[in-house]
Image (cartoon, rainbow, N blue to C red):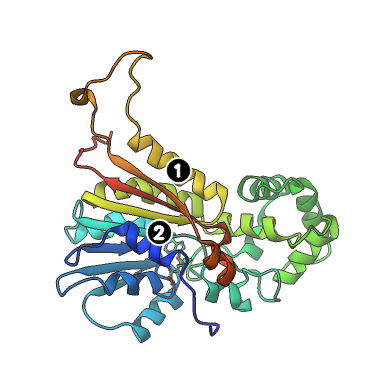
Amino acid sequence: MTSNQHQSVMFDESIKGLNIKNNGIYIDATFGRGGHTRGILNQLSGSGKVIAFDRDISAVHYAKENFNGDQLEVIHSAFSNMLTLLDKRGLTGKIDGILMDLGVSSPQLDNAQRGFSFNQDGPLDMRMDQTQGLSAAQWLSTADETEIADVLYQYGEERKSRRIASAIKRYQQDKSIDTTLQLANIIASVIKVQKNKHPATRSFQAIRIFINQELRQLSETLEQAIELLAAGGRLVVISFHSIEDRIVKQFIQKYSRQKQAPKGLPIMDSEIKETVFKDLGKKFASKEEVQTNKRSRSAILRIAQRSTLKVEKC
Ligand SMILES: C[S@@+](CC[C@H](N)C(=O)[O-])C[C@H]1O[C@@H](n2cnc3c(N)ncnc32)[C@H](O)[C@@H]1O
């Protein structure tokens, strides 16, 4: 693989999970390098379409250079804008499947200039969309110690969050933190090296999630999927850490759970009510995939199917 490629995670499982109709309209919320998009396109006939989103302009440029044909439209935007943008095109309630392959792509991680990696030196940026918002370096220079500690704890489940935040603020009394290795070294100076894990792993994950507002993006977009999907449409989400997966799991449970009858009372078939989604379960990457693609190690794929039930939003 070259540095501009990304090996799609759980490719077969996610394409199968979408249950593709050849004339359907599908959303790839996280285009990346288009591996999943290509898998969907390969199953479509002339009238089928993929609308893809990516908030990283380099993904959109990649699409322009490597994909052609009028069955694909790639939009440079956070996926949380999908309902607004697709509603304008009259597509609310008409989408046959939405795929979300969360997190960052290999080209983002591998390019030191993007600032996601604690293994390579580069500007401490971490924004997926470099055209807006604060970089990680800008945020660290303005945030106070408590705010930094809270982010590390909430989004990285980092138990040493307070010690790291205090070390960051001590360092900033003399110098600014501008690069990934500066930050990684400050963290390593207060945390013991763990087996197979760089001490900065959790903190870098936490800061990235915070800078890109990844959890808010995810929660908002899951709610939008209710309105966008047609009856029978599939929602397929691949997440890479427990905080993210918890949001997806709780969302699917919330909209697929039957109201409980009092214990011991029999339920008649006619009393079983339709729910907004049917939970079609979760999957993990196969042993073979984990051996060839390290990123798939932590992947959890969840699938749900939209029913015909209308949802009244207040
Ligand atoms: C794991 S990669 C997707 C890889 C892709 N499935 C493939 O096969 O090439 C995630 C991509 O989603 C994008 N992304 C992450 N969060 C996003 C969001 N909230 N809105 C739009 N794009 C997002 C990232 O910029 C990155 O390019």
The foreground one among 101 and 291 is 291
Q: Look at label 1 and name its amino acid.
A: Lys
Residue 91, horizontal then vertical, whole percent = 19, 57
Percent of width and height locating residue 266 = 29, 16
Left or right: where does residue 217 sit relative to residue 75? right
Q: Residue at x 30, y 62 (%)?
A: 27
Q: Which label belongs to residue 83?
A: none
Report, in whole angstroms, how far the alpha carbon at label 1 lies from the one at label 2: 14 Å
Q: Residues within 10 Å of mark 1 (few under 14, many from 20)?
A: some
User: From the viewer's perspective, is residue 146 above or below residue 105?
Assistant: above
The residue type indicated by label 2 comes to Met
Q: Quadrant of the C terminus?
A: top left
- Name the quadrant containing residue 189: bottom right
Q: Secondary structure at mark 1?
A: helix
Give the residue number, with chain letter if any, for mark 2.
100
The residue identified by callout 1 is 249
Upstream in the sequence, badge 1 or badge 2?
A: 2
Left or right: residue 128 versus residue 200 is left
Residue 210, picture quadrant: bottom right
